[in-house]
Amino acid sequence: MKRPWLRTALLFTGHLLNDGYSSFFAPLLPLLINRLDLSLAMAGLLGTIRTVINSLMQPGLGHLVDRAQRPSLVVIGPLLTVGAMAFIGRVDVFWQLVLIMTIAGIGTALFHPAAASLVAAGKHGGRGLMMAFFSSGGSLGGAVAPVVIVAYTTAFGLERTPWLLLPGLLILIAFAVPLRRQLPAFAKQTHERLRLGKLPRRLLFLWVAILFRATTATAFSHFLAVLVVERGGSTFAGGAAISVFLLTGALGGFAAGSLSDRFGRKTVILSTLLLAVPSLLLFLHGPTVILLPAIAMAGLFVLSSTPVGVVAAQECLPGRTGLVSGLVMGLAWGVGGFALTPIGWLADRLGLIPVMSVVALLPLVSALAMLFYHEEPKTV
């Protein structure tokens, strides 16, 4: 018997694994900057490489999922991510780090649209809550990984990260084997070519809103450890800040998903966008004693509506869940990742906090786009 919630729970584990290992980079960034003598612009470029590769591939792979149903991608993706990121501590030159970011980006691009399509497969209620549960796996992995990797490298050294390949492979097997028995029965589908001009206008406004919110979330999660260290915190405190930021986003996703099933996707997304701005500014300019509470609130409001946006996009184009998941989970976040390089370049010249203060205002642009998003009424 195929059980959607059990399948989603297994995909939650895969999401935790994939995004957990891909989150090793940001907390180790201060160490890598010192070791390889990187500028902030070069650090931003590395994040851009991974997210852009991820974004460029996800819509195409999502389209492949819709047409050919390739559930094996949910296993191949984390395999590449784990295999690449486990060797991040052994890099000696910049190009090796570029290679690791490239492979990890491909792995993430393979996993996300295939997994999101499997979560949405079949007819069942509570899609917002189910997608929130799946999405929280990635956020939880990203939240736990910084503390784990910083504690591990502190205890054993940066050069011992390849040993982390072993637990990654064990977790991969643990979710992949039972997942085979929970895959839905795919009906053969035929899809006519979809042109950009035929996309629903409300999907375009939603995509713009997700883009600017994703730019803010990506920039803060990427430079968060550097911001904390710059303000006098330790490397461990920087990793803890990333964990708090992502963890509150994951927990908030459950509430956001459930509330969106009751009150609508637009209401939840718009509310969180407006609340995100003061939280981010409080973190950047408030007293140091409230750094962690402020970043906790920021993570809650910036990240909690992520699964709501995915479900809203899937509802705009029924039957093309892989494609739209790739557009909003991949392309929007990846285009937002393009901003990491100019943000790093400007931070080298103007300072990181002034530049990030402008980035903190971008959710207001998202909120403006959501005003033009018209949600279809629910059918009973």
Image (tube, rainbow, N blue to C red):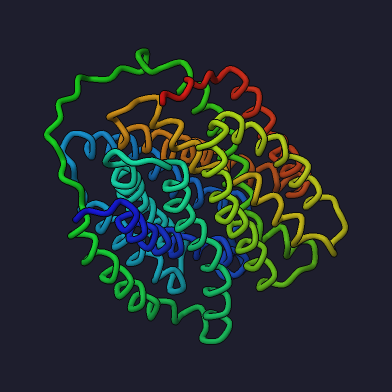
136 sits left or right of 76 in the view: right
24 sits left or right of 188 in the view: right
Q: Position of residue 45 (x, y in %)?
A: 52, 48
Determine the residue located farthest toward the bottom in the rendered image.
155
Determine the residue located farthest toward the left in the rendered image.
188
Nearest to the observer: residue 3 or residue 148: 3
Q: Is residue 211 visible?
A: yes
Nearest to the observer: residue 244 or residue 342: 244
356 sits left or right of 366 in the view: right
Determine the residue located farthest toward the top in the rendered image.
197
332 sits left or right of 278 in the view: left
In the image, residue 319 above or below residue 6: above
Q: Position of residue 135 (x, y in %)?
A: 46, 51
Nearest to the observer: residue 51 or residue 246: 246
Q: Position of residue 370 (x, y in %)?
A: 59, 24
Label total for image: 0
Please report the residue visible at 40 percent of the width from the left and 77 percent of the height from the top: 164
In the image, residue 23 above or below residue 183: below
In the image, residue 166 above or below residue 186: below
Please report the residue visible at 73 percent of the width from the left and 42 percent of the height from the top: 355
Please report the residue visible at 61 percent of the width from the left and 30 percent of the height from the top: 267
